[in-house]
Amino acid sequence: MGNSSENQKTEKQGKERVTFSGNIGYVLAVAGSAVGLGNIWRFPYLAAKYGGGMFLLVYLILMLTFGYALIVAETSLGRMSGKSPLGAFRRFTRKKSIRVGGWFNAIIPMLIVPYYCVIGGWVTKYLFEYLRGSSSALAKEGYFNGFVSNSVSAEFWFLVFAVAVFVVILAGVENGVEKVSKIMMPILIVLAVIIAVYSVTRPGAIEGVKYLLIPNMDNFSIMTVVAAMGQMFYSLSIAMGILYTYGSYLKKDIDVEKSTSQLELFDTAIALLAGLMIIPAVFAFSGGTPENLQAGPSLMFITIPKVFDSMGAGNIVGFIFFLMVLFAALTSAISLMETGVSTLMDELGGSRWKNSILMFLIMVVLGSASALGFGVWDFVKIFGMSILDFFDFLTNSIMMPIAALFTCILVVYVVGFKNIAKEVKQSSAFRRQKLFEIMIKYIVPVCLLIILISSVANVLGWIEL
């Protein structure tokens, strides 16, 4: 696990490392990372497409087993090493074949945050338009495609969102990341509850509630499991380097297992609220047709604005909804950028200011490519995908399962379960220790291979997800 001088150096750096103020700050920061655009629009359309209540049941089972194991593993490794992912892998092993896992975990957030900020810019644009009272315009056919293909407008709103994220990161961990999460997450929950209550009380919405909450075996298929597994994997910020980084900011007296349980509850509650916001509304105002329910990524920017406009209070509901989505997008983007900045500081040295500027420049270059990929660069296709879609596929479907596999290898064959248990038990009873060991050694690797193979097969046209 590395030489003694390297270990001593790491331990010294770990003691000097900035930390969260306490359990609440950590949980809200990680929840802010996990609760993002994936929960708000990805969960509802996947739930609608793959069985409603059956999808939800499978998702919950996977969350409490697969998700739990990887959250504990990454958080513990981060706290043990006092480092972001690249430094953590270097801390534990000299083998370059395993250290490459650190590179995967470190690079992923740097590739995700640029295009994530592009989508965050779209959300900001919609919020601005609802504030102006443009509900009817947003509901018109072709509005969204017209906006994203306008390179000047798309680039402008991308930069607005990216600058907002940059400002928070400059403020640091406790005064920036933690403080923003403590403010935004409670507001996000309140807004989500308001919209969900409004949605489920509309005439005809009860059918949507039943579809989402009541499992029906007739709706079950193997793709229900694959889709739920993929959603749970991405929803929890697993294999993005985030949990390593936030774990390295975690004080030794913080209960890792309790914090993980709180994160599971928080993430599931938001995903469920998102389902109750969107699916009943689509049932009530669009008849719950498969075309509307399975609209995929366009659900948030095309289908939902039409639903809001048909409500008669489109501007008010639309503004509240997109304000909530903006908060979710900001907290996730902040955690992604923070992970990138932390890695740069660990590897390059220097101040937070200098490394934040470097990360921001990376965001602007790669993000601009994604923003312009629907406009002046729409002719650029990679494996038939736009630039944004390609980065999404590369990170989510290829790199993240591989990164998580390396985490399993690091735990099982390098660090060992005894050392992980020792770390967790400093502040926790580790009641699910046996489950953790079985999942990390046997079940999780198989699940990750299923995600990886099915995702690649889907892109190649062999199966349809």
Image: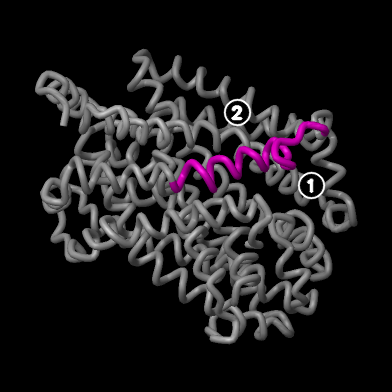
Q: Which residue is the site of mark 2?
A: 163
Residue 303 belongs to magenta span: no
Q: Type of residue at label 1?
A: Glu
Q: In percent of the image, x 40 and y 20: which residue is there?
A: 352
Residue type at tag 2 = Val
Q: State the extent of the magenta-drawn residues as a range.
A: 379-401
Residue displayed at 76% across by 31% down: 372
Quarter occupied by the N terminus? top left
Q: Residue 312 got which mark?
A: none
Residue with the mark numbered 1: 129
Looking at the rendered structure, the number of numbered marks drawn on it comes to 2
Residue 298, compared with residue 210, is above or below; it is above
The colour style of the image is one colour
Q: Is residue 302 left or right of residue 199?
A: right
Residue 187 percent location from the top left of the image: 51, 55
Q: Residue furthest front?
A: 462
How crowded is the residue under tag 1: few (<14 C-alpha within 10 Å), some, or many (20+)? some
